[in-house]
Amino acid sequence: MIAASVVSAAAMMALGILSLAFLFTVYRVVTGPTLPDRILALDMLVAIAIGFIAVIAIKTGFMLYIDIAISLGLVGFLATVAFARFIITQGQSSSSKQPLSDQGGKGESLGGRTRKHGKRRKGGR
């Protein structure tokens, strides 16, 4: 009987701590100064959600919640990898664009080609 009350008190304390961590992490998602900070905060939200699910599973004794937590962890990992690939491709596309002064000519940039004279081509391109 005393063991059940200790587990119940620990579960309530864990839910309180996880709630506080959830609020701080949501604040970081909203105010994160950079995109990688926001992605890390979203990954942390997944970890906190897994913690909530685990505590609820222990408190209720319904162990199917553990399987749900594992699958949420896999989905969270895949989302983090997808966001990381997005950041990498975004960084490569912005670094491939060079300003006009670095191209060595006075022409306009046309996606890798340079037009020497300021004339427009027919067809609006």
Image (cartoon, grey):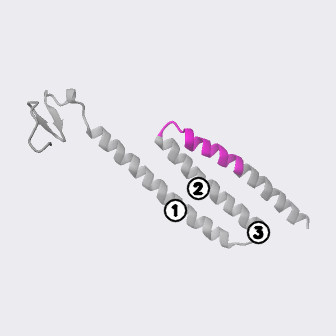
Which amino acid lies under the numbered mark 3 shown in the image of this protein? Answer: Thr
Q: Is residue 6 left or right of residue 109?
A: right
Q: In percent of the image, x 48 and y 57: which residue is there?
A: 79
Above-or-below relation of 11 to 118 = below
Q: Are marks 1 and 2 in contact (CB under 8 Å)?
A: yes
Q: Quadrant of residue 9?
A: bottom right
> Quick one: quadrant of the N terminus?
bottom right
Region rendered in magenta: 19-34
> Quick one: quadrant of the C terminus?
top left
Which is more N-terminal, label 3 or label 2? 2
Q: Quadrant of residue 90?
A: top left
Rounded to the nearest angstrom, the CA distance separating label 1 from label 2 is: 9 Å
Q: Are marks 3 and 1 in contact (CB under 8 Å)?
A: no
Q: Is residue 96 left or right of residue 24?
A: left
Q: Is residue 10 left or right of residue 94?
A: right
What mark, if any, has residue 46 been given in the picture?
A: 2
Q: Residue furthest front?
A: 123
Q: Secondary structure at mark 2?
A: helix
Above-or-below relation of 42 to 106 = below
Disc 1 crowd rating (10 Å Cα; few below 14, some 14-19, many 20+) is: few
Percent x, y for residue 75? 52, 62
Q: Secondary structure at mark 3?
A: helix
What mark, if any, has residue 75 been given in the picture?
A: 1
Q: Are marks 2 and 3 in contact (CB under 8 Å)?
A: no
Label 3 belongs to which residue? Answer: 60
Q: Secondary structure at mark 1?
A: helix
